[in-house]
Image (tube, rainbow, N blue to C red):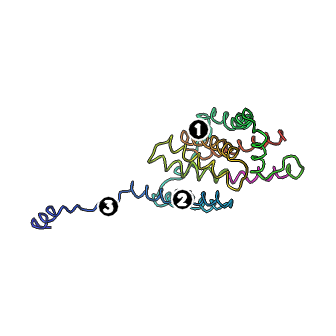
Amino acid sequence: MNAGAESRSSQSGAKPGREPSPHDRALYWLTFVVAIFLLTLIASLYTGQDLFIFGYVVVIAYALHGLVRRNGSWQDLGLKRGFVKDFKQVWYYFAIDALLFQVLPPTLGFAFVFGYYPELLSHIAGRLSVNFGSLEGMSAVGGLLAAALVLTLMEEVVFRVAIQERVSWFVGTPAAVLFAAVIFGLTHAVGTSGSLLVILTDVAGVALDGAFFGIIYSKTHNLAVTWVTHYVADVVGLIALVLIF
């Protein structure tokens, strides 16, 4: 551009366009993917159908695409060595959430104090679609434990490895842990029934578990540690329900 053209550009007040930075593009894609997930979740809560599974697929595809596009390592998906070392860093979080909170859930204690413990307990059992007081229900528990191996892995990839980790790039770890935990809790309200208080209490209990899983992941960035914690929590929680009923 010659001097005259530069002068005319300056006089007209025109500003050169700024190319989107990698940071901008990462934020655009994250916003788009999270928006899809939230829309499918809202649709699921409204219809009672598991439409948010489509959101799961989108989030997992997004995480895998980012890994390939950036030529990253498998550690970007939380796949790393050093399970024992990482577990030692967070064993107390594991003990609190996967053991103590499953045997003595704070939300059940809250419901007991305020007089709706039976309703909350029935709501949780109904959410699991298991009649714990029957032989058929006992046999269904085995199927749930087997399915949980896959489901807990998928949930940890979606909520901790993908959503929490990437949201933390822009808003910080504490806010990302809370955000992922809340939507994790809300997915467990899909297709359930009961009073708003009972549903919100159940969501709060699941979100509390999700917060612990999120803290564990933020400290270790090890998918195996959060997966084991999540699965053990589900196993202990199911055993506790069997004993209660």
- Position of 15 with respect to 70 (left or right) is left
Q: Which mark is residue 19?
A: 3
Query: In which quadrant will I find the C terminus?
Result: top right
- Up the image or down, 114 lies above or below 15; here it is above
* Of 212 and 9, the residue lying toward us: 9
| Amino acid identity at mark 3 | Glu
Disc 1 versus disc 2: distance between alpha carbons? 24 Å
Nearest to N terminus: mark 3 or mark 1: 3
- Position of 92 with respect to 241 (left or right) is left
- Position of 50 with respect to 36 (left or right) is right
Which label sits in the foreground, 2 or 3? 3
Which residue in the rendered view is the most extreme toward the right? 135
| Amino acid identity at mark 1 | Asp
Q: Residue at x 62, y 46 (%)?
A: 224
Q: Which residue is mark 1?
A: 86
| Residue 191: quarter of image | bottom right
Q: Residues within 10 Å of mark 2 (few under 14, many from 20)?
A: some
Q: Residues within 10 Å of mark 1 (few under 14, many from 20)?
A: some
Q: Secondary structure at mark 2?
A: helix
Q: Main secondary structure of the magenta part?
A: helix
Contact check, label 2 and label 3, Cβ < 8 Å:
no
Magenta stretch bounds: 139-151
- Up the image or down, 147 lies above or below 105; here it is below
Nearest to N terminus: mark 1 or mark 2: 2
Which label sits in the foreground, 1 or 2? 2
Q: Which residue is mark 2?
A: 64
Disc 2 versus disc 3: distance between alpha carbons? 25 Å
Which label sits in the foreground, 3 or 1? 3
Contact check, label 1 and label 2, Cβ < 8 Å:
no
Nearest to N terminus: mark 2 or mark 3: 3
Q: Residue 88 in the image: x percent, y percent? A: 61, 34
Q: Residues within 10 Å of mark 3 (few under 14, many from 20)?
A: few
